[in-house]
Image (cartoon, coloured by chain):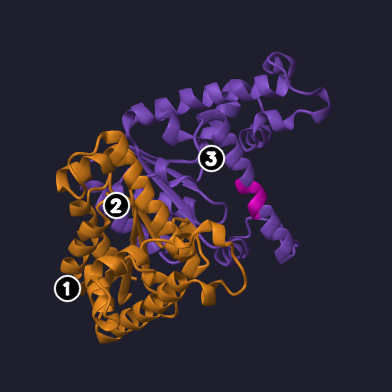
Chain colours: A orange, B purple
Amino acid sequence: MTRIITIRREFGSGGRELGRRLSEALGRAYYDQEIISEIAQRTSLSETYVRQIIERRPAMSYPIRIGRSLHMAVMNPLLAQSNEIFKEQCAIIREMANASDCVIVGRCADYILRERKPFRLFVYADMDYKLARCREKAEVQEHMTDEELKRHILDVDMHRAAYYNHYTNQKWGERSTCDLCVNSGTIPPKVAAPALARLISEL
Amino acid sequence: MTRIITIRREFGSGGRELGRRLSEALGRAYYDQEIISEIAQRTSLSETYVRQIIERRPAMSYPIRIGRSLHMAVMNPLLAQSNEIFKEQCAIIREMANASDCVIVGRCADYILRERKPFRLFVYADMDYKLARCREKAEVQEHMTDEELKRHILDVDMHRAAYYNHYTNQKWGERSTCDLCVNSGTIPPKVAAPALARLISEL
């Protein structure tokens, strides 16, 4: 049986719900926001700030007019800080995986734990489903129009992809880096979780 | 329960085996080569010829020096023939879907039957797995070197994609056009089939 399950997901797809349900069905630990809290605690940075850093490609945060050079990491305090945070992130995720079988959502866990061959899940859905789900879960401000909300969903995913691609040298949504890609718009997390729990138990 | 299951697959990934096992687990009809045989019968063309046409983007078969124009279909007998074959293909696939619940491998079935909302599976694997599987199944000439076999695998998929994209106006391997994408290199068809049969039964 595969001990570690990692989940990458499009914003609004319900990947987090699938992860939680899967962890319950398998009786495993579940890590998501806990990783950011732990990084914040270890680095004395605020959770909000860590989240901002962790969800953007570090180099993009640097003003364009400064240009890029081989010394970028030295010259760019944001990039250096992001690298420091990624180092903590790696340490924490490895500790979690060592402590017990678990389900980890996001945070490049599939790459960080690649030597343990985790089961790598990717959750996606079409835009209409994600819009409806975001409205239902009120994951974003209610004042957004559908067009603004759609832009927001695409932005979050773009930044997730940029951060993932930067630190893993892989492509965030590429199927070759996944074991299973689930369309939660047509396979609801409630139905997917028990079926995937059985599948994973048999591997 | 979803009545129709369609499978797109990378060459050498074992998508056909997964389809066959899935049809057995669900007690449904299974269609694959039968579609080509039926087209050949109805059009009085040989199976080999139908297969050649059906696995290439029609326009690509036409000599480049002739150029393209709005009258291409009229001027290009190969494209006209390919369109004719696609028309038969649509009719046969709809007849099969009307006759009984079934699993259909390839042939743009997911698109042709889109109004019936089939369960759309995509099967893929990494190149090492596909090379090993092709060698084991002897699906290609034994005299090929690994490099030649790899080229052959990529070529078959390129042509499958070109044919699919041409007739469906969708992208062959794009996850947004699938309900589930399975990496058969890490989830063997033997394990995947019963688990997916249960999952599909619950939808």
Q: Nearer the viewer, residue A137 or A194?
A: A137
Q: Position of residue B56 (x, y in %)?
A: 65, 36
Q: Position of residue A14 (x, y in %)?
A: 24, 52
Q: Is residue B105 left or right of residue A71?
A: left
Give the residue at mark 2. Answer: B197
Q: Secondary structure at mark 3?
A: helix
Q: Specify the quadrant that holds the C terminus of chain B.
A: top left
Q: Main secondary structure of the magenta part?
A: helix
Specify the quadrant of the image occupied by residue B53: top right
Q: CA distance from mark 2 to mark 1?
A: 23 Å
The chain holding disc 3 is B
Q: Residues within 10 Å of mark 3 (few under 14, many from 20)?
A: some
Amino acid, disc 3 = Gln
> Which residue appears at 23% of the width and 39% of the height?
A144
Residue type at mark 1: give it: Gly
Q: Which residue is mark 1?
A: A27
User: Residue B117: x, y in percent?
Assistant: 32, 33
Stretch of the chain drawn in magenta:
B153-157
Q: Secondary structure at mark 2?
A: helix
**From the viewer's perspective, is residue A60 above or below residue A129?**
below
- Quarter of the picture holding the N terminus of chain B: top left
Query: Alpha-carbon distance for marks 3 and 1?
Result: 43 Å
Where is residue A111 shown, x and y percent of the image? Answer: 43, 72
Q: Residue at x 49, y 64 (%)?
A: A59
Please give the label number shown on residue B33.
3
Q: Chain of mark 1?
A: A
